Each structure stands twice: as C-alpha cells, then as structure tokens.
Amino acid sequence: MTDEEFRADLMAAVASRAEVHGTGHREAFVDEMLDRLREAGELPDAETCAETLTGSRNRRLEIDAFAFDDADESLHMLAAIMDGGAAMPGPITLTDAREQGFNRLTGVFEQARDGWLTRNIEESRPLWALARRIETSGKPAALRLSILTDRPMSERIRAIPSGLTNEQIPVTYQIWDLTRLKRIHEAQNARDDLEVDLAFLPGGGLRALPATSGAGDYRGYLAVLPGEALADIYLRHGSRLLEGNVRTFLGRRGTVNTGIANTIEKEAERFFAYNNGIATTASGFTARNQPDGSILMTSLTDLQIVNGAQTTASLASLRRSRKLPEGSVFVPMKLSVVAAEDAERLIPFISRFANRQNQVRESDFFANHPFHRRMQEISRRILAPAAGGSQVQTHWFYERARGQYLQEQAGMRDAQRDQWLRRNPRNQLFTKTDMAKVESCFDLLPDTASRGAEKAFAAFADRVTKGWTDEAKRATYSDDWFRAAVARVILFRATEAAVSKAEWYEGGYRAQIVAYATARLSALAQEHSGGGHLDFLKVWAAQSADKMLERQLLSIAHVMMDVLRSPPKAGMNISEWAKQQACREQALKAPVCVLPGFDVWLMGRDAARSATRQARADQEVGDALTARIEIMKLGIGFWTELRTFAVTNRVLDSTDLGIVSTACTPGRIPSDRQAARLLEIKQRCETRGFAAGAPA
C-alpha cells in the first residue's frame, strides 16, 4: 500500500467517523488518531479538549486532547495540524510543528500552571477543568507533547531533542505523521521508532550474557542494569515501555511500591538480593561481541517491560525526587528477543508466565480471549437486514485485532474492493474497545465507561471471563447476543449524533453525556418493563433508532448533562465527577420523562428470559457441532502427535490422555463433551510449546 492509498483510507475513516458520530472532520481526525495510537500502545487513554484562544501577552494557545498517564505520572498534550484535502499534502517541517503545535501546547501548560487560564475563561469549558487540574495537582513527572497530522514528516527531521519547561519539568516531543502511522499499521506489533539508547551506560552499553542456544523463535539474554539507568530510560520513554497488560495492572496498583522505597532508603546495597528484577522483550538490538563471550548492547528496538513495572516506576519516582543513590542499586534483567512476526503469538505468553507470581488477572490478557474470536466469526457470517431502501444486506464488521478491516482489503482489485465495501461499509465497523464501552453503559456502569477505553475494556473483560468459565453462561454469547450488541452500538451512536446537534449542547463532555444517557435509557427500560429490557432485536431489525427513541434519548441526555454539570463540590472537574460511583447513582435515580410510544420498544422480563434460554440452547448445539468439525479437520495424525508431546512432557493426566486417544482412533467420533475438552487440551498443550510438526 502506498502512502497515498493509506492516507486516502485514513481520511475515509475520518469522514465515516464524522458522519456516524455527528462531529466535525477535525474532531473526527483527532479521535481516529487517538484510537489508533492507543491501540498500538503509543498513548494512554486521552480526552478530547479542542480549544484555540489568545492567552496572556497575546500568545496563541491551542490544544486538541490530553491524557494523564497513571503509569508514569506524566501529562500528554496533543494538537492537530490537519490538511484534510483530497490530494497528498506537502511534508510538515520542524518549524511548522513548533509554531503551529509545540509552542501553542507549551503555552497552554504554562498559562494553566500560573493560573491565567482559570482566571480568564469560563468554568463551563473543558479547558478550564484541565487548567484547574494542571494548576492544583503539582508538577507532572514529564510533559509529553505530540502533534497529530495527516501530512508526511520532512525527511530533514531526524530527532527532536528533549527540553525543559520554565519549572525544569522534562519535555519530550513527538510528531505522529502519516508515515509513522502507516508503519504502525504495517508493523502490527512493533512500537514505532521505539529505539532505546544504551550507549550512555558506563562502558558504552549494557553487557549481557546469552541464555539460550539461539535456536527457535527467540533469543534470551541476562544482564544487570544500574537502577538509575533504568529510571532514566523510563523517564525518557514513559509508559510506552510497558506491555499493554502490565500497563493496565500498574494503572490499578499505582506507581510507587513502599517495600522498594524502604529497601533503597535503608539497604540499597541489598536491592539486587531482594528484588526479582525485570523481564523484558525486544524485537532487535545492536551490539558488539566481547572477548569473554558476552555482548555489549548499545541499543534495543521495541523494548517492552512485561514484568517488573512497579520496580521500574518506583525507581523512576525515587530518581525524580533525588532519593535514588547512584551506584548502589542494580536490577537483574531478563531479555527475550522476539522477531516482530512472532511477537503477537509469543509476547502474551511471556507476559502471562512472567506475571504468574503477581495479581495480574486473566482478564488482563483478554485481548486474545476466545470471546473475540467468536464475535469475529459471527460478524463475518451474519448479514444485517437491508435498511433505508437498500437492496444489499451488509455485515457489521467486528475488528478483533488492530487493522483487520484494512488487511482484508489487501490485494483486492478496485472492483473487488468496491464490492467488499458495499458488504462491509465503514460506518458498520466497530472494535473490541467500542464494544466494551457500549456494553459498560448498557450494563449501568457509565462511570466505568467514563474512565477511558483501557479501564472500560478491563472491566468488561472481568465480566466476560468470569462468565466464560461456565458452559451455560458461555453459550449466552450467541448470534442473538451479537445482534443485540450491534443494536446497542446503533443506539449509542444515535445518541452521539443527536447530542452533537442538540440546541442545548454547548460543546465539551459529549462522551460523558452519551455514556450516562444510554445507561439511564437502559435503567428506564428495566423500570418500565417489569425487569426486562429494550427490545434490541427490534432495533437490529430496523438497523436504526427511530425518531421516537431518538427523542427519548435526547430528553434523557439533557437531564444527564445537568447531573454532570452539578458535582457535589463547586469547581470539581466534570470528567473526574463522571468517573465516580456517586455520580452514577445520582444519574440513574434522576427523574426523566417517558415519552409516548416508548413501551413499544420494551421486552418484558418473561419474554426476555425465554429468548435468552432459546438463544443459549441454539448456541450450545452450534458450539458442539463446531467443536466436532474442528476435531475431525485436525485429523488423527495431529492428535497422535499431540498425545506423544503430552506424554513426553507430562502435560496431561490419564483421563485427558484417554480423551485424546479417542481422537487418535479411526472410526471413533468424540462426544460433545469430549470435543469441547479436546479443544481445551489443544490450547493447554500449545501454551506449553506444542506445535504440529515440531519435535516433542
């Protein structure tokens, strides 16, 4: 795919987002970029905050989004420099980036810190709440400024040196241009341009010992890293260094471990003995061989910390406060070098096993859960009813992994692509994080949805993984469940578009208003259907929220806006208020008008339960048939090979070996229960290293 083709697809995605969500193209562009960078692990969850104004001393101030990163205590501020035209624009220069972006963002930060913004803009504006937080929360560990642009970056820009604010806060600069975004898409799992320089270490690099033979799909190394060096690397690169599951875990736990702090304060020289160290992965490195058989690493590509995030964050925090003694603290380091093409398969396993001793939840690894594979399979199979006079039935495309929608079009000719897009329109694309957010709202958890995509995804993961272990509950996630989930997405998006156009909407906090409006709609449906819910299959059949439902949603949204703008403490940040359980409780009890015709869209409790039972039974039959077909497709040779592996490596007990023997016997067909168990056995053996065709 050329840069021109990639940009055309990006701008088509922006146009579709603007239409679906009822926003302007610039806001849609920012949202699209934030989603892609968050999915790639380059940014934490960010909130939009589009403001352009003239500040103190006629300084031009501008910002489009921000994020407070719990993992490294830094503040991200982002501005868009968008061309938006159909033709490929010229490159963005460093002068453009500074004058139209970095300088304006720095101005926002500095005039928030000195109180000018809170004294001179209205409290109702989202920027006031951000400025208030910057002014009163103390200095961030680092300020990370980013430019989002649909232009390519000038080839003259090699690197942008870090800087300091007038308060000596470290500042890093990033330009997320078209070329970098395309590289992220093509690399799939590699962090773009994440090169960690090690040449600053004593001796000119990190001395490491090979810990594997070099055969297979990864290479292992052992090293010892000075504590201050690890802290400096983390302060420079921030939470980009953290593997996604670990970042979620650290965000729950906080950054400073008191045990680590006490050890360093009282027994710094014993830190190496007391601490387990860090486990890391990388996709490559540069190094020089040493006469003693070790290697001297001078840089690492795509370094990720998969275990030891609290150790790293604690050292960085102590380094910032000048409580980390130089030359006394040393950290054991295990490095697994995994080729980029194997990263998606291996890194989740490395992370899972490295964190066995910690309270990292199974739901933290939810991105690769069978739930998503089931949703993907259903989405490719089920056709939605034709709507709006169209004669073409379409798919709602569930994107389980980043970039799938674009990948499926790769290699198609123009006519084929046009036909595929008619069946899979972009405005019917939704991702796993979209689903998590929408489901949280309709599950009456708008406070969870307001905490950002990662936290909403983690909470949704908890709910699904707990239910998935029960066979009956697992069968609930059926074809009809998918149809109902799409209906909820339809209602959510209809609310977004309606709020954006509402006369009473003044701008800002739309995400929170929509989250609370859809949650209150769900609660209202329960109240007026005797414990039932909205008739989601009726919404699916219509493929839209009709005018009556839109009016009902808009009426509720207006009430929710008033709740959000009335926190219990004057001056309280509205975004933070929306994340609190107290806000949720107040909102779900707030009286709202029920419009005539609302009851037509309700399903009573008995009817809802009956529909769920039938859908579950249908799914159980389908699951059993699918499992049997997969067992037979794999063939006797596969199961014989797996049995040999299991016996050699002592993976299975006698009962499971007996079930595997059933699949190895010609003419024998496993029962439904045996087929389901065989698939579980297959997955267990694969996590222990089984691969068909490989030596046992």
Image (cartoon, rainbow, N blue to C red):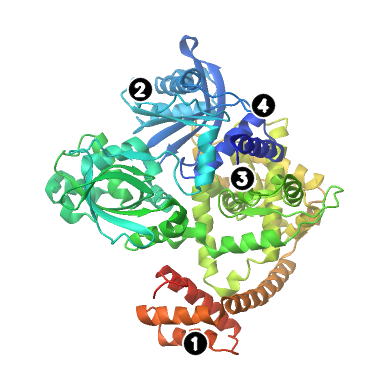
The N terminus lies in which quarter of the figure? Answer: top right
Mark 3 → mark 1, Cα distance in angstroms:
51 Å
In the rendered image, residue 653, in percent from the top left (x then y), is placed at: 40, 84
Q: Earlier in the sequence, mark 3 or mark 4?
A: 4
Residue at coordinates 71% horizontally, 73% vertically from top-left? 614
The answer to whether mark 4 and mark 2 are in CB contact below 8 A is no
Q: Which mark is residue 165?
A: 2
Q: Tag 1: Cα neighbours inside 10 Å, few (<14), some, or many (≥20)?
A: some
Mark 3 residue type: Ala
Q: Residue 384's spot in the image, x, y percent?
A: 76, 56
Q: Which residue is mark 4?
A: 85
Of the two numbered discs 3 and 1 in the rendering, the one whose residue sits closer to the viewer: 1
Regarding mark 1 in the picture, which secondary structure is present there? helix
Q: Is residue 474 left or right of residue 199?
A: right
Q: Which residue type does callout 4 highlight?
A: Gly
Residue highlighted by disc 1: 661
| Left or right of 627 in this view: 319 | left
Q: Residue farthest to the top?
A: 57
At label 2, which amino acid type do we have?
Thr
Q: Position of residue 2 (x, y in %)?
A: 60, 38
Q: Earlier in the sequence, mark 4 or mark 2?
A: 4
Q: Residues within 10 Å of mark 3 (few under 14, many from 20)?
A: many
Q: CA distance from mark 3 to mark 4?
A: 33 Å
Q: Residue at x 60, y 82 (%)?
A: 672
> In this rendering, which labeled residue sits more in front, label 4 or label 2?
4
Is residue 49 at least partly visible in the picture?
A: yes
